[in-house]
């Protein structure tokens, strides 16, 4: 837990019901064995890694599938070790950078620099035009700036090592227990720890020893990651006022619909044509293309990408209000059945 930081889950729905398995509200959900549900999630994780091998362990998919939860646990797999590419040796004259380096050094393998920016500038003036990053996490205190003088510059990992370049801030903190080992009203054992992070104004994400951690939030979730709280944790959409989306934020969407009659798939007006949208508000996807951005998508989550510009919960809609200091809070707003997840920062707060 981080003092002054709170995450509140707000789900848009009106119906009730619950289930721990996907799909949440399907009539047959309770008949699906938990073991089958878990194996399907594992299969989805493996398939996702094959679809996007550049993402390596695909950490975001791993957590989204809840594979770190108590009911379904699987190891997070790294990049496949069967790559046909062999690491190249660093060319003579390369500039080396290490998280433990010193910018007063010569930039050699024995006396590496610490600043990637300085290394890029020196390498741009050298014959090798190569920067070699040693293993470990390289924290950036400012943006790396490259211009025409850096053309044909190569930045490579040291053979056999795994460097990570991070725009985060390394916190050197001492954790202390705040509320640990107590049984709360839900008969759960509390496990809340705190640390002083004075001087840090914003914490968009938190990692402990390189592993993603969950900031203080309500409700707590067994898997430790933001997922839909289920239909038992819903707040009606009528209990909040919504600001319409900004449809011009990313420019227009390029629509494509396959209207070839030979490709028609009669289905009562649902999902009858191949169609996609590219760019525009679909830019939130990677790659920026999706069926859900097409001109006339079918289904309850058809406009998931059309994120409202804001939301104002009405009095009594949120649990445990009023709050002492919600300035750092984030709202996670879910559509039913996990069709979409919208995130909002707090712009203003009125305790009444």
Image (cartoon, grey):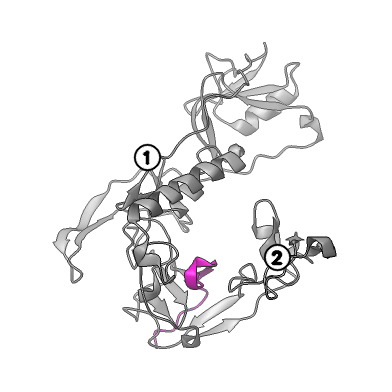
Label annotation for residue 209? 1
Q: Does 169 sit above or below residue 315?
A: above
Q: Is residue 131 visible?
A: yes
Nearest the viewer among 217 and 288 is 288
Name the residue located 41 percent from the left edge and 88 percent from the top edge: 315
The quadrant where residue 235 appears:
bottom left
Label annotation for residue 142? none
Q: Does 289 sit above or below residue 91?
A: below
Relative to residue 335, is residue 195 drawn left or right?
left
- Under circle 1, the secondary element is loop
User: What residue is pinned by disc 2?
Assistant: 293
The quadrant where residue 20 appears:
bottom left
- Under circle 2, the secondary element is helix
Q: Is residue 213 visible?
A: no
Relative to residue 254, is residue 128 drawn left or right?
left
Name the residue located 58 percent from the left edge and 74 percent from the top edge: 300
* Residue span colored magenta: 333-352
Residue 248 at what x, y percent from top left? Answer: 75, 71
Quote the CA–CA distance across marks 2 and 1.
Answer: 38 Å
Name the residue located 34 percent from the left edge and 80 percent from the top edge: 321
Residue 294 at what x, y percent from top left? Answer: 73, 66
Relative to residue 224, is residue 151 drawn left or right?
right
Residue 19 at what x, y percent from top left? Answer: 35, 68
């Amino acid at each position: 837990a981080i003092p002054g930081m709170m995450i509140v889950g707000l789900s848009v729905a009106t119906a009730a019901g619950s289930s721990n398995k996907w799909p949440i509200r399907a009539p047959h959900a309770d008949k699906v064995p938990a073991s089958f549900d878990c194996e399907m999630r594992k299969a989805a994780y493996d398939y996702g890694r094959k679809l996007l091998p550049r993402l390596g362990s695909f950490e975001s998919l791993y957590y989204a599938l809840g594979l770190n939860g108590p009911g379904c646990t699987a190891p997070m797999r790294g990049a496949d070790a069967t790559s046909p590419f062999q690491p190249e040796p660093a060319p003579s004259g390369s500039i080396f950078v290490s998280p433990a380096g010193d910018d007063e050094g010569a930039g050699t393998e024995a006396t590496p620099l610490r600043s990637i920016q300085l290394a890029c500038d020196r390498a741009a003036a050298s014959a090798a035009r190569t920067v070699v990053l040693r293993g470990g996490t390289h924290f950036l205190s400012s943006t790396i700036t490259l211009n025409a003088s850096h053309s044909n510059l190569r930045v490579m990992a040291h053979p056999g090592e795994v460097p990570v370049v991070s725009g985060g801030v390394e916190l050197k903190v001492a954790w202390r227990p705040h509320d640990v080992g107590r049984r709360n009203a839900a008969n759960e054992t509390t496990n809340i720890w705190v640390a002083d992070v004075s001087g840090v104004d914003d914490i968009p994400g938190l990692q402990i020893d390189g592993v993603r951690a969950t900031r203080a939030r309500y409700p707590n979730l067994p898997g430790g990651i933001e997922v839909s709280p289920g239909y038992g944790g819903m707040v009606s959409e009528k209990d909040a006022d919504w600001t319409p989306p900004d449809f011009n934020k990313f420019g227009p969407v390029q629509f494509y619909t396959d209207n070839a009659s030979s490709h028609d798939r009669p289905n009562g007006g649902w999902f009858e044509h191949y169609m996609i949208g590219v760019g525009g508000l679909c830019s939130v996807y990677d790659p920026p293309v999706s069926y859900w951005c097409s001109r006339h998508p079918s289904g309850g989550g058809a406009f998931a990408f059309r994120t409202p510009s804001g939301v104002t919960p009405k009095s009594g809609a949120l649990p445990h209000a009023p709050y002492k200091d919600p300035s750092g809070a984030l709202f996670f707003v879910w559509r039913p059945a996990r069709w979409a997840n919208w995130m909002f920062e707090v712009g203003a707060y009125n305790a009444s």
